[in-house]
Amino acid sequence: MLTPDEAERIARTFKALGDPTRVRLLSLIAASGDGEACICDLTEPVGLSQPTVSHHMKLLVDAGLTTREQRGRWAYYRIVTDALEQASRTLRP
Amino acid sequence: MLTPDEAERIARTFKALGDPTRVRLLSLIAASGDGEACICDLTEPVGLSQPTVSHHMKLLVDAGLTTREQRGRWAYYRIVTDALEQASRTLRP
């Protein structure tokens, strides 16, 4: 059985994905050739301002679903491949 | 790219798991021999009343993560094996 701490951590990961904009942002990064995307390429497809997208991306980074790297003017986000799989592992029959 | 409707539906699935009690309930059902559990076996491990557990389970059923079957006095819940996998599919690099 999951400890309360483990359940907390797993729920935090899923909670970050309980929002359609963040689902779309993560799917955009997933669909990019190398599993990485510049914030400059994320704003237009979701139709939101850069500060709003940055805020959503911060929640995904905090949940461990993506990493963030600043390169010059732009932030680049990369999917943490195993994060969703690890959160899902104990929830399969 | 995901349509807004698809993103909504996926986010709803994850939102249901954005709560540690529901994560524990689903993991308990997953850990049961046949991927099914009676509500009578779920209340004690999570230390909550049956009405509270029923409420959490209703949210998991509504999100498509489990099914519910009433047999005599008790409700039985079964994991929808593919639900989490389907929600996760577009979020992998």
Image (cartoon, coloured by chain):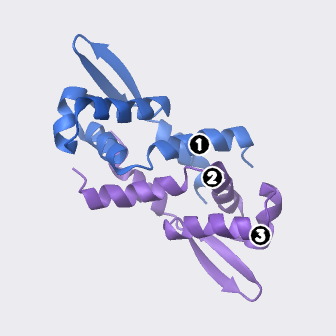
Chain colours: A blue, B purple
| Left or right, residue B20 beside residue A35 | right
A56 is higher (above) or lower (below) than B28: above
Three-letter code for the amino acid on which mark 2 is drawn = Val
Q: Which residue lies furthest to the top in this view?
A: A72
Quadrant assignment for the C terminus of chain B: top left
Asked if the residues shown at circle 2 and circle 1 are in contact, with their CB atoms under 8 angstroms apart, the answer is yes
A5 is higher (above) or lower (below) than B52: above
A90 is higher (above) or lower (below) than A8: below
Three-letter code for the amino acid on which mark 3 is drawn = Gln
Three-letter code for the amino acid on which mark 1 is drawn = Ile
At x 79%, y 60%, the residue is: B48
At x 37%, y 36%, the residue is: A56
Residue identifier under label 3 = B50
Residue identifier under label 2 = B23
Q: Residue furthest bottom?
A: B72
Closer to the camera, A56 or B92?
A56
At x 58%, y 45%, the residue is: A11
Camera sees residue A53: yes
How crowded pointer 3 is (Cα within 10 Å; few <14, some 14-19, many 20+) is rated as: some
